[in-house]
Image: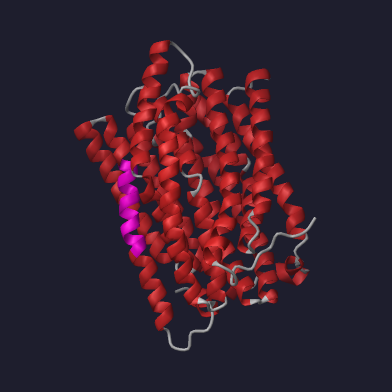
Amino acid sequence: MKSHVKLMTEGKPVRLIVTFAFPLMIGNIFQQMYSVADSMIVGKTLGVAALAALGASTWPNWIFLGVVMGLSQGVSITLAHSFGRGDESRLRKGFGNSIVLCAGFAVCLMAAGELLAPEMLKFLGTPEELIPQALIYLKISYAGIPVITAYNLLASTLRALGDSRTPLYSMITASVINIALDLLFVRVFRWGIGGAAWATIIAQFFSAVFCLPAILRIRQLHIRRADLVPDIPLLRSIAILSAPMMLQNFLIVVGGMVVQSVVNTFSVIFIAGFTAGAKMHGVLEIATSSFGFAMTTYVAQNLGAGRIDRIHEGVRSAFWAAIATACVIAAVMLLTGRMILSGFVSGTAEEIEATVNVAYRYLAIMCVCLPVLYLLYIFRSSTQGLGNTFLPMVSAFAELIMRVASALILARVIGEDGLFIAEVAAWGGAVVVLVFSYFHTIRKIENRKGYSSAYSITDRGQ
C-alpha cells in the first residue's frame, strides 16, 4: 500500500486545503457517529439519569484529553516545519523525541486522572445520584489515556506530512468497532455506562494500530536509536509550541466545567437535554477541526519553505470555504435536529418532549452563530501554523472570560437560555483576538530582516 504523504508547498492552495480537509471531515463524521452512538445507546438503554451522568463526566474527561491534543498539535507543527523545509534529519529526530515525550505524559496524566476523578465531580457540583455512574465512566476513560495518546501522536504525525486519508480510514474503523461494542457491552452484556467507556478505548486502540503501518511506510520517519535520545533544544522547541496549546485547551475545558457546574444546579431533565445538545455541538464541528488541521499543515509547510505569498492566498480561500460550509451544516441541522435529538432519550412522553425541547433550543442558537466558530478555527490554526501558539492561548483566556461571565450572569438574568448563549459568546470573544493574532504574526514574519524559513520561529519560540 502506498504512502499518502503530500507536500503542500506547490499547487493551487484552495484545492490542496479542501482535498486535505475533506477526508478529515468524513473521518469526523464517523467520529461523531460513535460519540453520538454512545449517548443514544446509553440514553435509550439506561435512561435519562445515565445520559445525564455521561454529560457530567464530559468536561472532567476533556481536561486530560485537551492536554494530549495540545501536545500532539505542537508535535505536528514542529514536524510540518521540518518536512516543508526538507530537513529529514530533524524530522526523524523530532518524531523520535515526540514518542518519548508523549509516553511520559500519558503515564502521568493517567495517574493524575485516576487520583482526581472523584474530586473533580464534587467540584462541579454533580448531583449525588449521578456521581457513581459518572465516576465509573471517568475511571475507565482515564485508564485508556495511553491508547488515546498513541493515536493522537500517530494521526498528528501523518497530518503534518500531508496524509489526511489514513486518519480517515482509521476513524472509520474505530467508529464501526465502537458502535458494535456499545451495542454488545451496554445492551447485551448489560455493563452499564462503563461498557460505553470500554467500547471507546478499544476502538481508539484499533485506530492507533491502523495508523502504525502508514507511519512505517514513510521513509523519512524510519527512526534510529539515536533519534530517541532526548535532544534538549528540540524538546524545548516542541514545548514552546505545545505548552500554550495545552494551556489553551485547559482553559477551554475550565470554562466548560464552570458552565457544567451551573448546568448541574438545574433539573436532571435539563442536564440530559443540555448533554444531548452538547453532543450535537460535535456534529456542528464536523468541518471545523478538519479546516483547522488543513490550515495548520498548509501554513506550517509553506512557512518552512518560505512561501508567505501562498499562506496569504490559502487563508483567503479557507475563509470563504469555511463560511459556506458553516451555512450548509447549520441549515441541515436546523431542519433535522429535532428528529435526531429524539433518538437520545427514553422515558415517559413528557420526559422525552421536555428533554428534546431543551436540546433543540441549544442547537438552534449554535446553528445561527456557526460561521463565527468556523472563522475561529481558520484563524487559530493558521496562527499556530505560523509558529505562534502564544496568542491563540491568549484567545483562550478571552473565550474563558466570555463563557464564564455569560454563564454566571445570563443564567441568573434570563435562565436556561443564558447557558446556551454562553457558548456563542465565547466564540465571539476568541475570534476578535484571533483575527488580530493572525495579521500581527504574519506581518512580523514578513518584516523580519533576512527571513528565509520557519526554523528561527520554532527555535526562538516567537
Name the residue at 53% across, 47% down: 65
Name the residue at 55% across, 38% down: 32
Residue sitting nearer the eye, 324 or 266: 324
Q: Position of residue 38 (x, y in %)?
A: 56, 30
Residue sitting nearer the eye, 69 or 137: 69
Horizontal side of residue 227 vs 337, given as left or right: right
Name the residue at 75% across, 64% down: 218
From what the image shows, is residue 387 above or below residue 404?
A: below
> What secondary structure prevails in the magenta region?
helix
Residue sitting nearer the eye, 77 or 14: 14
For the N terminus, which image quadrant?
Answer: bottom right
From what the image shows, is residue 171 above or below residue 21?
A: above
Horizontal side of residue 51 vs 166, given as left or right: left
Q: Position of residue 408 (x, y in %)?
A: 26, 39
Q: Residue furthest left?
A: 413
Q: Residue furthest top?
A: 348
Horizontal side of residue 409 vs 176, given as left or right: left
Residue 232, picture quadrant: bottom right
Q: Which residues are magenta?
A: 422-435
Residue sitting nearer the eye, 172 or 82: 172
